[in-house]
Image (cartoon, helix red, strand yellow):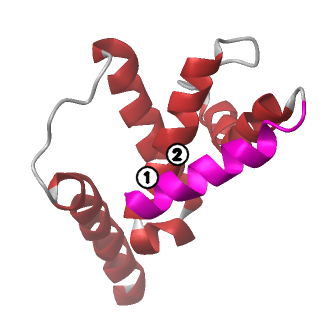
Amino acid sequence: VHNQQEHLVMLLANASRDRDGLDLLHGKLLANYRKWAQHQSVVPQCSSDRDVLSNKTTDMALTMLIWGEAANLRHVPECLCYLFHKMRGELWKSGVLGNRPPGWFLSSVIAPLYRVMRHEMNKRTSQ
């Protein structure tokens, strides 16, 4: 988490040099997610271009945290988009994700995705 926090702070510092830099950074970090949402015919859960900066910063922080914790799922971008969609939706509803025990994300989110992916790969190889 600390590495992703530092990375986001550096990105924000560099982006804040331009008048529209933070908006551009938000757009770059969430461009793939917006394309995914459009392809899935779902309403994007991220902040719009005209939203307040604190909501955009929340989107960017969540994106970096998911990226940092997702390990090999980084190679499956649609999984990252799905994770962002579900977790941002939960944030919009509750305002916070609540206190989760250490390892919650790995055991409750990532491990089930790996199991589904392994099951699908095993189905393909057994055909």
Q: Is residue 115 above or below residue 43?
A: below
Real-space Cα distance between discs 1 and 2? Answer: 5 Å
Element under disc 2: helix
- Residue position marked by numbered label 1 in the rendering: 66
Q: Give me the disc on residue 63.
A: 2
The residue lying at 32 percent from left, 16 percent from top is: 95
The residue nearer to you, when weighing 126 against 97, is 97
Q: Secondary structure at mark 1?
A: helix
Q: Is residue 27 above or below residue 2?
A: above
Task: Give the camera-side residue of 41 and 20.
Answer: 20
Residue 70 versus residue 15: which sits nearer the camera? 15
Q: Are marks 1 and 2 in contact (CB under 8 Å)?
A: yes
Residue stretch rendered in magenta on the structure: 1-18
Provide residue 64's location: percent of width, then percent of height.
Answer: 52, 51
Q: Nearer the viewer, residue 86 or 26?
A: 26
On-image quarter of the N terminus: bottom left
**Residue 67 relative to residue 33: left or right:** left
Amino acid type, label 1:
Ile
Q: Is residue 35 visible?
A: no
The residue type indicated by label 2 comes to: Thr
* Residue beneath the point at 42% across and 45% down: 83
Residue 53 visible within the image? yes
Is residue 85 found left or right of 60 in the rendered image? left
The residue under the point 43% across, 51% down is 65
Which numbered dot is residue 9? Answer: none
Tell me where residue 123 appears, x and y as whole percent. 34, 77
Q: Does residue 94 belong to the magenta stretch?
A: no
Mark 2 is surrounded, within 10 Å at the Cα level, by few (under 14), some (14 to 19) or many (20 or more) other residues, namely many
Going by the image, does 6 lie left or right of 38?
Answer: left
